Amino acid sequence: MAAKDILLEIGLEELPARFVTDSMNQLSDKIKDWLQSKKISYHDVQAYSTPRRLAVLVSDVAHTQEDVHEEAKGPARKIALNENGEWTKAAMGFTRGQGMTVEDIYFKEINGVEYAHVNKFIQGKKTVDLLPELRDIVTSIHFPKNMRWANYDMRYIRPIKWITALYGQEIIPFSITDVHTSNDSLGHRFLGGKFQITNPGDYEELLIKQYVIADPTKRKTMILDQLKQLEEQNNWTIPVDEDLLEEVNNLVEYPTALYGGFEEEFLELPEEVLITSMKEHQRYFPVKSKDGKLLPHFVTVRNGGSDYLENVAKGNEKVLRARLSDADFFYREDQKLEIDHFLNKLQSIVYHEEIGTLAQKVERVRNLTNILTEKLSFSNDDKQAADRAAQICKFDLVTNMVYEFPELQGFMGEKYARQKGESEAVAVAINEHYMPRNAEDQTPTSEVGAILAVAEKMDTIASFFAIDMIPSGSQDPYALRRQATGIVQILLHKDWNIYFEDLIHESISLLQAEGKLKQSVEHVTKELVGFFKLRLKHLLQEKSIRYDLIDAVLGDDLGDIHGLFNRAEVLEAKKDEADFKENIEALSRVLNIASKAVAQGEINESLFENDHEQRLYERYGSVKQQLSHPVSEETYYELLVSMKLEINQYFDHTMIMVDDEKVKQNRLNLMLLIAELIKKFANVNDIITKS
């Protein structure tokens, strides 16, 4: 029998744009998994989505499941047969479970033991009989937010209005709430209507006639082509933000781009205000000249055809004009007030009920910033700039503009600080201390902005750990993981000698002084170190560092993050060298025996009993002396493995755990000294060496 196509379309009330793509992908993946689990062969799965529908078209679906021929293993012979050679209950239960009888059993030897086996044949069921199970796929899609409608107990992203389900020309029968499957579908809400689908393969073309572009990729291409046409016709540049394009694409079924304008006097507002008003609130694309200057125009995408575009443009202009008028008012009102006015307001704003006010947070950030600039020997000018930037870094949060447009925090702080006469370094740092804002954002470029960003993020993370609000699973409401990653990225881009444990200690000390710790200092420190190790592990994995090498460099203190990453990269580069295995094994021998020591003491050379002890001690001294000066991580590694010969000869000719307690302790002391050097580079015991 010839293969047929499957069409499944879920018709819904308009979906939130941010959920459309993920929901479509879930439906497609679940269909693929179901077909695979049922052993139903097919050619391809094409996914579709619009604000009103999620759909999949599966081509060339087999009319039956694949037949299954498989060998099932049962109990051992001594369990399957009793002393009289009769079948036991275990044997009969095994065959019954397989749909067979004991007469079908044969024995097969595995690792010297005979086991009962049966050959099982399962004839594939007809696909059409299994397809009603698609109902469970529809109801199993996960959404971040759900709703109930009418009197139904079912919760879903939006009420289901229709379900189109076809296998060839045959309707797949099932229902959800009071919606029954059919071969009917609906076109564009205003330009289309109800229509029938008799052949699943015609789905996309039939929808086009109903003013619906079901393929999101084709819809996005249409939008981009139309934007390009407007650019060419008007000699414009239309910057395309990918997130905005994705959102707009999921707001329309039949896209038509059009443009409008606004009064030139609004261009006196900061560019960020204008763009935010257009993008975040109206989903408009801003327009620029060829030399990058913002123009008093915008582009929007209509969900429909090209009729009455002038009227649509005027309506959009009216809405945007009101938005920009509000922004202009807020901007001018903010300029009437001084920074101190806003700083005073921070004292009454609660950051978190267990952590304190925004003013208290700012004071901790300021103290931590000053501690760090002192440790890093910043110039006096940079110290003063960092102190002032920390003092006023949050003042824009209580301005009218940021209250109305929260996305502008930092951006407006920089603008207002510059207007109020603050130095350029201070103004830039206020904006940069939020960076990186997301995975695609860059790290701060200025030293002052970078150190303030580290201090602010570290205080945020330490504060929530202090009150035992630690991210778990997918729950991270305060984005602590993102901020931890931001700290690491900043430290990697800056050539600062910051010992990470010191950064954690200073943050906790400031919180302890305010009585904010719910747990002991030791407990909070341990939790923070573990938290950052997980972030570092994730970042190292992104650099394709092998997992055991990551464990090795994360095995001890975090120390200098820059050095930690370099050590991981050195090990990754060395792991395939011919002598890597013997190098690591030699160093591991030292760590293994050093772990048996219970105390550390001085080396007494008079207790050496052979030349190999003396040679290893001297070699250690030479390596330690060279490491007392700054060296690259690769040089550090080479110096460690330069002791390999002396280490191996030492172990070949020296028994460490002897009866003489003084000699034994002296030898353990030497192992401890060498182990200390090794562990500063990596816990090499975690490294897997292959023959």
Image: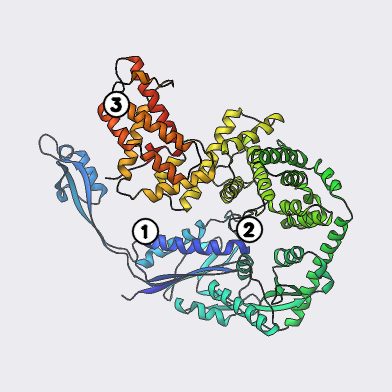
Residue 168: mark in rendering:
none
Q: Nearer the viewer, residue 110 or 571?
A: 571
Q: Earlier in the sequence, mark 1 or mark 3?
A: 1
Q: Name the residue rendered at 75%, 44% in the picture.
A: 384
* Residue 302 screen position, x and y as percent: 68, 76
| Numbered circle sitting on residue 149 | 2
Q: Residue at x 21, y 39 (%)?
A: 89
- Residue under pointer 1: 37
In this rendering, which labeled residue sits more in front, label 2 or label 3? 3
Q: Is residue 94 above or below residue 668?
A: below
Q: Position of residue 26 (x, y in %)?
A: 50, 60
Amino acid type, callout 3: Asp
Say which residue appears at 44% left-offset and 22% top-offset: 600
Q: CA distance from mark 1 to mark 3?
A: 68 Å
Residue 315's place in the image compared with 140, above or below, is below
User: What label sits on residue 611 in the rendered view?
Assistant: 3
The reply to whether dot 1 and dot 2 touch (C-beta < 8 Å) is no
State which mark lies toward you, 1 or 2: 1
Which amino acid lies under the numbered mark 2 shown in the image of this protein? Trp
State the SS at label 1: helix
Mark-to-mark CA distance, 2 and 3? 86 Å
Q: Nearer the viewer, residue 298 or 343?
A: 343
The image quadrant where one finds the N terminus is bottom left
Q: Quadrant of residue 505?
A: top right
Rate crowding at label 3 as few (under 14), some (14 to 19) or many (20 or more) other CA atoms within 10 Å.
Answer: few
Element type at mark 2: loop
**Residue 150 in view of the camera:** yes
Q: CA distance from mark 1 to mark 2?
A: 33 Å
User: Is residue 163 placed above or below 663 in the rendered structure?
Assistant: below
The amino acid type found where label 1 is placed reads: Ser
Name the N-terminal-most of marks 2 and 3: 2
Q: Residue furthest right?
A: 336
